[in-house]
Each structure stands twice: as C-alpha cells, then as structure tokens.
Amino acid sequence: MKFTPTLKFNGGRLRPLEATDRDALFVVYQQPELPGQRPLEQPEQLDRMIELSVQMAATQRGMMWAIELGDDNSGYQLLGMASAYDWQPSLLKVALRIDGLPRLTMADRAAALTACINFMAEKYHLRSVAYAWIQGQSDAIPAMLESIGFQRSVVMRDGWRLGQDDYCDQTLYHHILPATTAEARL
C-alpha cells in the first residue's frame, strides 16, 4: 500500500522512496548540507530510512520523497530528498526539509516545497508549515523560502549542535496557509 503519492512540479517530480534509491541517496548524503553533519559511511545506512519512510507516512508522522528532475520522455534523475517531519495532524502543522546535490537549484527546491505544501494542505488540511535554516547552509535558502510565502519567525541562538562543544544559530521560518471556505465556517 502506498501512502506517499508521486507529485509533479515544473521540471521534475517528487515520488516515494524505493529500495533502489539507496545508491543515489548515498551520493546526496556524501555532500551533507547541514553544518556538523558527517557524510554517511555505508550505503546500507539508508536501508532503514527508506523502510521507515513507509511507516512514517502510514502513521501520519512524516513523509519522504525522492526529488527527481527531468520528464516522462527523457527520464528522471534523483538529485535530492524532501522530508515532511514533526507532523502534528491535530494541530494542522508540519515541518519540511530539502537535502540535495548542488545541481538542485533554489528554483527546483521552491517548486518541490510548493508541491509538498499544496499536497499536504489539500489532503490533510495542514495550515502551518515550518522550515529551519541552519547557519552555515546556503545563504540563498532564506530568500527562496520567502519567495514562496515563508516568513522568518525566530532566531534560536546556538540552537543547532555542531559537535561536542560547538553550536550555531538556527532560524525558523513559517508559512501559514489561509483556511478554506469550509474550514472558515467551523
């Protein structure tokens, strides 16, 4: 049973993770985007994550998608992963994250995030979406987030642990979607 749908966006698609994605995801995680994150040592480390992606979606705890660029005619190439985590259905909220290779542009990331947001808003009526930018990630991420409706909410000083004694700032962005007509009547 599939709980995570395939979502199309301009220039690519998001699709459920599959066991065959392990090697491509290993390449993605050899270039970690988050400060303090170490590259994975073994591709097998991703097997459990791929397995858990189905369980997370089935229990409404999160979703993971492979981000692929291309089209149905020429084929697709996996260049990243989108994650929906900290999913709280009763509060209508979720946090999102994108991990990708340098070839995954900010426009691609914005399109993938927008597809995730639209799906989760329509299917699960989620209205509060969060994204955490960690000091040391690409400086283009905050502008990309703001271009699709996110607003900077708070800066947590030393909110991200880099190692035993090192920390950096974490900035939280939120995007509050308007209620639908039916929800507004409640």
Image (cartoon, helix red, strand yellow):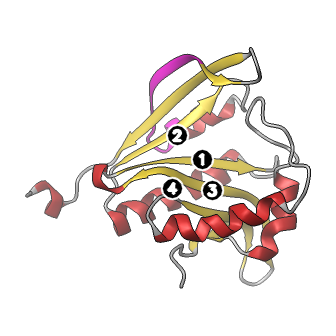
The image quadrant of residue 69 is bottom right
Q: Nearer the viewer, mark 1 or mark 4?
A: 1
For the residues labelled 3 and 1, say whether their Cβ atoms are less than 8 Å apart. yes
Question: Distance from label 1 to label 4 (Cα)?
Answer: 12 Å
For the residues labelled 4 and 2, say whether their Cβ atoms are less than 8 Å apart. no
Crowding at dot 1, Cα within 10 Å, few <14 / some 14-19 / many 20+, comes out as some
Choose the circle earlier in sequence order: 1 or 2. Answer: 1
The single residue placed furthest to the right in the displayed view is 41
Name the residue carrying label 4: 114
* Residue 180 is inside the magenta segment: no
57 sits to left or right of 81: left
Question: Distance from label 3 to label 1 (Cα)?
Answer: 6 Å
Question: Distance from label 4 to label 2 (Cα)?
Answer: 12 Å
Amino acid residing under circle 4: Thr
Magenta-drawn segment: 146-158
Name the residue carrying label 3: 82
Residue 131: give its label: 2
Question: Distance from label 3 to label 2 (Cα)?
Answer: 12 Å
Residue 97: give its label: 1
Question: Distance from label 1 to label 2 (Cα)?
Answer: 6 Å
Could you tell me which residue is drawn at 50 percent across and 36 percent down?
A: 146
Q: Secondary structure at mark 1?
A: strand
Amino acid residing under circle 1: Arg
Where residue 100 appears, as percent x and y from the top left, is 75, 50
Choose the circle earlier in sequence order: 3 or 2. Answer: 3
